[in-house]
Amino acid sequence: MDIAQKRFELENAVVESDWTWDEDAADELYHAAPWKQDPHFFRQVRISAVALLKMVMHARSGGNIEIMGLMQGKATADGKFVVMDAFPLPVEGTETRVQAGNAANEFMCMFKELSEQIGKQESIMGWYHSHPGYRPWLSGIDVSTQRLYQKHQEPFLAVVIDPHRTCAAGKVDIGAFRTYSEEHAAAMARNGGAASSSSSRGSGLPLEKIQDFGVHANEYYPIPIEYFKSKTDSAILATLWERYWQETLSANPLTSNVDQTTQEVREISSKLSMCPLCRPLNMRESRQDGDSAGAAMGAVGGPGNSSLVGVAQDGAALSVDLLQGMLTHVSKFVLFQTPTPTICPPAY
């Protein structure tokens, strides 16, 4: 149990830290609103280990369906978001989108009231949702949702988790984002602003998602994430691992992610068939290279990078995940299933 917990903390670089809620500091920051003058005011996100675990378990429970929840915490005057807790929302998502309705809004208000009654004063400062199998980034709908939150409920943060990649790699695949205002995004477009650093994460996206990624990649920016835990978090984590250590020990990404692995292989095959260098000569001449998916793949690759390089990177990443799963399986077999050799006494 201790080994599994330590591995989780080491893989995600969880550090010890304590936090407190300061109502006066929150009010002062809200009225100062420094993010209005500096679109990149928030430069770091700190997430408690328990909040991270809650979000990952919620995302994993949704399978291939997107889930959504909210985060409680605070923003600081030095440009940090501190996520102290998270809770799920009763929403009905699909494999491609999730949006909160009236029932979710009522649940959110009731949860906030009950939290205050038991002494939890942290404000709702962000939302999270899952992208099952297609990496953390913001789609067009996500950008619109986050902009609405930032307009009416600042300061606010967006977090995206890929539960399939998390299970396959053993490390949480997560991203935190803030959107630019429409005016700032338009000004960047007019001035030929550089692409968001999140564009480098376009590798590994399904074909049907690549174009949406490229269209909205410059309307938001990613924020680095680090994790922490308090003494209370340590006690909660110990209790959770005491309950789930059997599942952690018996889990194998090779068997639990069969469908996702198959889908990734198909995606790589489809992308290879669209690469100009991988087509027969007569097909290269008859088919234009400027089709929407091909152009989007080139846009994600960026200047100087061909679509073939991106496909090769996807294949290498998938191979590493499969090798890690195989090594885990072999290690468990050697430890628990290999019979102990019998030492026969020497014959005289």
Image (spheres, rainbow, N blue to C red):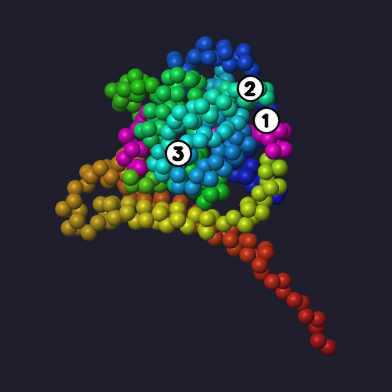
Residue 185 x %, y %: 35, 24
Pointer 3 with pointer 2, Cβ within 8 A: no
Q: Amino acid at mark 2?
A: Glu
Residue located beneath label 3 in the image: 92
Of discs 1 and 3, which sits in the foreground?
A: 3
**Residue at image coords 48%, 39%:** 67
Mark on residue 116? 2
N-terminal label among 1 and 3: 1
Q: Amino acid at mark 3?
A: Glu
Q: Is residue 312 visible?
A: yes
Separation of residues labelled 3 and 2 (CA atoms):
27 Å
> Which range of residues does the magenta coloring cover?
209-236
Quadrant in which the C terminus is drawn? bottom right
- Residue in the foreground of this view, choosing between 292 and 297: 292
- Residue in the foreground of this view, choosing between 42 and 113: 113
Q: Amino acid at mark 1?
A: Ser
Of discs 2 and 1, which sits in the foreground?
A: 2
Figure check: 164 above or below 24: below
**Residue at image coords 28%, 45%:** 293
Residue located beneath label 1 in the image: 17
Figure check: 343 above or below 297: below
Label 1 secondary element: loop
Separation of residues labelled 2 and 1 (CA atoms):
23 Å
